[in-house]
Amino acid sequence: MNRSIDISVLVVTYNSDWIKLKNTLSSILIQKDVKFEIIISDDGSRSFEEEKIRKHIDDNARDNVTYSIIHRKKKYR
């Protein structure tokens, strides 16, 4: 059975603390009986931890999760 996504969760960050972001992602990843996507959007942080985020999600996600990471590196003029 191919279920569509039930819920989309948007996590918006800017210079976020890794522990707080990790806790946020963990609280999302423990959800059961729902298929969801996580969209993480960062607005140009200089120390954006994309590899840590990917590893944390990959290590803790069930088969009910898809995710995308968006990191804007340039400032608008």
Image (cartoon, rainbow, N blue to C red):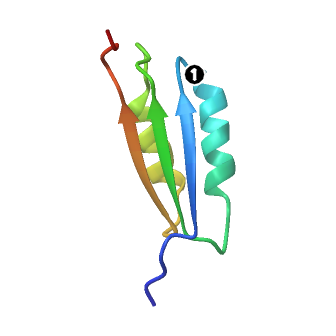
The residue nearer to you, when weighing 5 against 31, is: 5
Q: Farthest front residue? A: 77
What residue is rendered at 57% in x and 70% in y? 6
Q: Quadrant of residue 11?
A: top right
Amino acid at pointer 1: Ser
Relative to residue 29, is residue 47 depicted above or below?
above
The answer to whether 58 appears left or right of 74 in the picture is: right
What residue did someone put label 1 on? 16
Which quadrant would residue 60 be assigned to in this image? bottom right
Can you say which quadrant of the picture contains the C terminus? top left
- Above or below, 51 against 6 in this view is above
For this rendering, which residue is in front, 19 or 74? 74
Please report the residue visible at 45 percent of the width from the left and 28 percent of the height from the top: 42
Position in image of residue 17 (x %, y %)? 60, 21
Q: Position of residue 36 (x, y in %)?
A: 54, 63
Q: Horizontal placement of 69 versus 32: left or right?
A: left
Tell me if 17 is positioned left or right of 41 in this view: right
x and y, in percent, of residue 61 in the image: 52, 58
Task: Tell me the quarter of the image containing the N terminus.
Answer: bottom left
Q: How many marks?
A: 1
In the image, 20: left or right of 42? right
* 10 Å crowding of disc 1: few (<14), some (14-19), many (20+): some
Residue ranking furthest to the top: 77
Residue 5 x/y as whole percent: 50, 70
SS type, badge 1: loop
Q: Give above or below for 15 relative to 36.
A: above
* Outermost bottom residue: 1
